[in-house]
Each structure stands twice: as C-alpha cells, then as structure tokens.
Amino acid sequence: MEKIIQSASSHDAEIIAFLVSQGNKDVAEKFELTLENNPKHPSFYTKEWVLSDMDRGEEYFLYQIKGVNYGCVAFEQPSSEISYLNRLSVLPEYRHKGVGEQLVKHVLEYSRTKNVHMVSIGIIAEHTRLKKWYLKLGFIEKETKYFDHLPFDVTYMSYELQN
C-alpha cells in the first residue's frame, strides 16, 4: 500500500477543514458540543480557520493512501523549546488502523528536526479513551485546567524528546 505523509499547503485548506471537522464530529456529539457552547471546536472547522492557522505559521500534514486523504495533523512551534501537536484528525471509517499513531510519530520526528525538547497537546479532560491512547504512545499527563469559555476542562499532556 502506498502510504505517505506530506506537507500541506494553502491549496489543501478545504480538504484539511473537511478532515478536521469530520474527524471530530463524534467528539462533539459525545460531549454535547455545539456552535453555541463551543464555537471554536474542531468539528466546526472551516477553510478560513485553516488559512488563518497557516498565516500564523502552523504547518499541516496530510496522511494519504493512493492519493486518498485519510487524516491530518498540525504542528505549531510557539518557542524554540516546545511544539504543539494540534488537530490530529482521522476520518472515522479509517480509525484503529494506525493512521493517528503514524501522524503523531511524524510530528514527534518533525519536532526533533526543529530541535524542540517537548511536544504538548491539550485534550478534553473527560475523554478518557483518548487520554489512554496518548499515554500508550508515551505522552505524560500534566495539569488539568478550567476555562470560562469552554464547556469542559482541558488536560495537557506532553512528550519529552531526546535529541
């Protein structure tokens, strides 16, 4: 099978928005997230949001098999020491096949090339299945925070890179 993970460009913004929104719709349903209570949730992602992310310097990567996009992930580097793994999204029909894990590993390796020491993520604190999955991949659970504008708490997790 011809699997590739490739850098995305602004020309891919529409497909990225589709992958992110479709890959997060079940999470929105599970946690009862709506445009009213969480308008910035990835399940409502748009092409404009993707382009805005790219303008801020966020980089996206697409996971493809034979030219078909199955998922994506974003990389952001707010400082020389840390990067963020953002918007990991896999279409529901392609989950549990290693796509998400390969995208995470890609961001970890990419972070190494940037001499980053720690990769950080934020997830819905009550999303225990996702938390267990990240723990299995080597992430460490850090703090959980409450934000007034969100209908859930956020748990931060990190992965220490050995350069």
Image: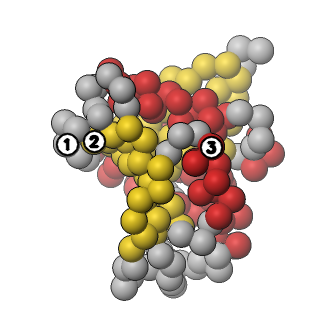
Q: Nearer the viewer, residue 155 or 88?
A: 155
Quarter of the image where one finds residue 1: top right
Q: Which of the numbered marks, if any, corresponds to residue 46? A: none
- Measured in 3D between alpha carbons, the distance from the residue under mark 3 to the one under mark 2, in whole angstroms, is 21 Å
Q: What residue is shown at x 37% (from left), y 85% (from top)?
A: 148
Q: What residue is shown at x 51% (from left), y 23% (from top)?
A: 6
Residue on which the image places disc 2: 82
- Measured in 3D between alpha carbons, the distance from the residue under mark 2 to the one under mark 1, in whole angstroms, is 6 Å
Q: Secondary structure at mark 3?
A: helix
Name the mark nearer the viewer: 3 or 2. Answer: 3
Residue on which the image places disc 3: 136
Position in image of residue 102 (x %, y %): 60, 30
Position in image of residue 159 (x %, y %): 43, 41
Q: Can residue 161 be seen by looking at this rendering?
A: yes
Residue on which the image places disc 1: 79
Q: Secondary structure at mark 1?
A: loop
3 or 2: tag closer to the N-terminus: 2
